[in-house]
Amino acid sequence: MATDPGYNLNWLFFKRFARLHRVMYPRLLSLNFGLFLLLVACSGLEQFLAYRTGIIAGQFFKELGDRDLESFKMTAIVNILIVLAISVTLSTRVLITKSLTVAWRRSICKYFHNLYLADFNYYRLNVVDRSLDNPDQRITADVSSLLEAYSSIIYKLIVTPFTVAYYTYDAFTRAGWIGPTGMFLLFLVSTVVNKMLMKPVINTTVNLEKREGDFRFKHIMVRSNAESLAFHGDPHIENNKVNEKLKDVCSTQQHLYYRNFGIDVSVNTFSYLGAIASYLVIAVPIFTGVYDDKTGSELSQAISENAFVCIYLISQLGNLVQITGIVASMAGSTHRVCELREKLEQYKDKRAPPPNQANDNLNNVVVHGENKKEEYGGKKKTNHADKKKPWLTKNVGEGVMSPYSAHSNYNSTNNPSDGVMEPDDLILLHGVSLKPPNSSGALLIHNLDLAIKKNRNVLIMGPSSSGKSSLLRALRGLWIPSHGTIQFKRNLHESLFFLPQKPFFTNGTLREQIYYPNLPSYSSLTSDDSEIKRLLEVADLSGLLDRCNGLDLEPAWNWYDVLSPGEAQRLAFVRLFVHKPVLAVLDEATSAISQGVETKLYTECLNMGICLLSVGHRETLKQFHYQVLTLTGFNGGWKLEEIAHNVNIPDLNSTETEEIPIEESLLPKDCLVSNQAVDNGNVSSENSSLCNDYSTKSLI
């Protein structure tokens, strides 16, 4: 894999790592900063006690050499207390460091969660953009490995500059200029050697993290699709593919160990050379006569204390070498984590502010399209502050994602083709053209005019890949039209509900699944237990209560593993009934449900007065809708037809399902809206108008 050239121990790394501290320490009066100050104090105390412990041997040499029993006893008692104190201090420092690591992880992960799970950013990263691999691994594994490595050197970063300065001065007073000079020369040589060995380690670490993410994701695929895989029979192909991912991980991991071998040899060599260098340094003043006036016991004490000072100085300098090695291993994780942060912040900066919900002007409308702007009363709002708000007229380009869902209201009496909303319009699409994000390919939908009106259900049909679900993505704000506008009735977002073909279930109780995305304890939904049980009966899910041991006991199993596709879709309808929105958008929401149960569910929607915008293939769905929008899948073609109903809704108590004879269209050819006029293979942007004399009295 080609590694990003920016994945190095360079200025970009230090810049990114410094910016990450703003997340790790959100404010001065925070738990994180308090733990950091406590760590500083504890580390300072530890170094003071370490110095006192280091000169113990010299003190004992002197007392034993002088044969002074009383001084020996006092020295022994004092040093025993010092050893006990440093043991407690060291353990306390380790505990504080681990607690600080947990606090860092909590702050960073919450920060990422707030960005990742906001404004459909998770959809952008995983579906649309895909410029960053494995965002989930970056938030979980990469953050964890980064902080574990950082926590192992944080106390060294705190105390090492001060200890190096102090022991340099102490070595100078004991051995002259040759003491600190020799130690620093050894450190300089080791630093140069280790720097040469680090660069390939960084790139290999980044490569390994990506391989680990791919390996984990492959196992997640098997777990998430276990039943589908089981139906296919012998999973030998998946076994081979999983082993291929394992091979990539293991080979990269072994390659990293080979790379680290050179660094380990270098670090260990210079560490042991430091011990020898301390005696070479003290030998100079001894053999030059500096210590000739000292007794044997005093000379033994001086040699012991000087050896400790020089060895500790080289140890502190060695800490800097070890720190550079750990920082090298951190660089890959830091770049990956901060890349994700920069991408999410980029999304945040490009996000336009939501419409002003405090404005009670009913003519407030937010327009989605190639040029996004906010309008009031059908004309652009003029304000001297607009020049400071580029989002008012920001060109978002073609096929990029909408940074938020627009929700607004507009009042008019014109036709949909005029682009002006009528009082009973919930959503109005005017001249909408749609193609996949970041794509220069053919249009999925061209120049669509459609009004979703209250109590007038619309069914969307068409072949696969004709743009049915894509149109719903545009309504949800996941995609933005390459041309045209989408207008929403004011505050419709408070009563707009989407049912995808594969419903989402979170971990939690049955009640939590039904109330989702609301929390039962904070929800304004008023459905009592008896009503929930009735709705479960409507969806043929009464047995689910027994399987879950009631509404409020979280099951030990995963909802996706236990519920069949049909049960999942029926439970999603129960969720819809409890929320009882003004408008429900159903994307193949009954594809795994029998027609008999489908009839019951749609009838319940009608009884509740829920307006429906449905995507489906079954002809039986037409009886629950007023209009059918057919997408041809060719050059963005479409046609909009009224539906005439000549049958009644089947008996809900009947367990048998029969084919319902519904004519595909009872309208004359000229009584529809379409963009099917083709001239030399090109789709015309001119659409025929609605048939004004068509009667809808026979509709539901």
Image: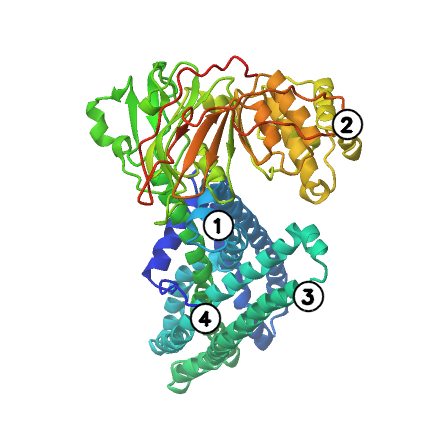
Mark closer to the chain start, 4 or 2: 4
Give the position of the N terminus as an image quadrant.
bottom left
Circle 2 SS class:
loop
Mark closer to the chain start, 3 or 2: 3
Report crowding for label 2: few under 14, some 14 to 19, many 20 or more residues within 10 A (C-alpha). Answer: few
Mark closer to the chain start, 2 or 1: 1
Label of residue 201 in the image: 4
Q: Please tell me whether mark 3 or mark 1 is closer to you in this view.
A: 3
Label pair 4/2, CB-CB below 8 angstroms: no
Q: Estimate the spatial distance between the alpha carbons at disc 4 and disc 2, rounded to whole Å.
A: 67 Å
Give the position of the C terminus as an image quadrant.
top right
| Residue 211 vertical placement versus 27 (above, below) | below
Report crowding for label 1: few under 14, some 14 to 19, many 20 or more residues within 10 A (C-alpha). Answer: some
Q: Amino acid at mark 1?
A: Ala
Could you say where residue 13 lies in the image, as x and y percent from the top left? 37, 59
Could you say where residue 546 lies in the image, as x and y percent from the top left? 80, 31
Circle 3 SS class:
helix
Instruction: Classify residue 121 by image quadrant.
Output: top left
Q: Which of these two is toward me, 544 or 357?
A: 544
Q: Please tell me whether mark 2 or mark 1 is closer to you in this view.
A: 2
Q: Estimate the spatial distance between the alpha carbons at disc 3 and disc 1, rounded to whole Å.
A: 58 Å
Label of residue 41 in the image: 1
Label pair 3/1, CB-CB below 8 angstroms: no
Q: Which of these two is toward me, 586 or 219?
A: 586
Could you say where residue 156 lies in the image, as x and y percent from the top left? 47, 60
Label pair 4/1, CB-CB below 8 angstroms: no
Please name the residue that numbered disc 2 is placed on.
655
Q: Amino acid at mark 2?
A: Thr
Label pair 3/2, CB-CB below 8 angstroms: no
Residue 423 visible somewhere in the drawing: yes
Mark closer to the chain start, 4 or 1: 1
Please name the residue that numbered disc 3 is placed on.
236
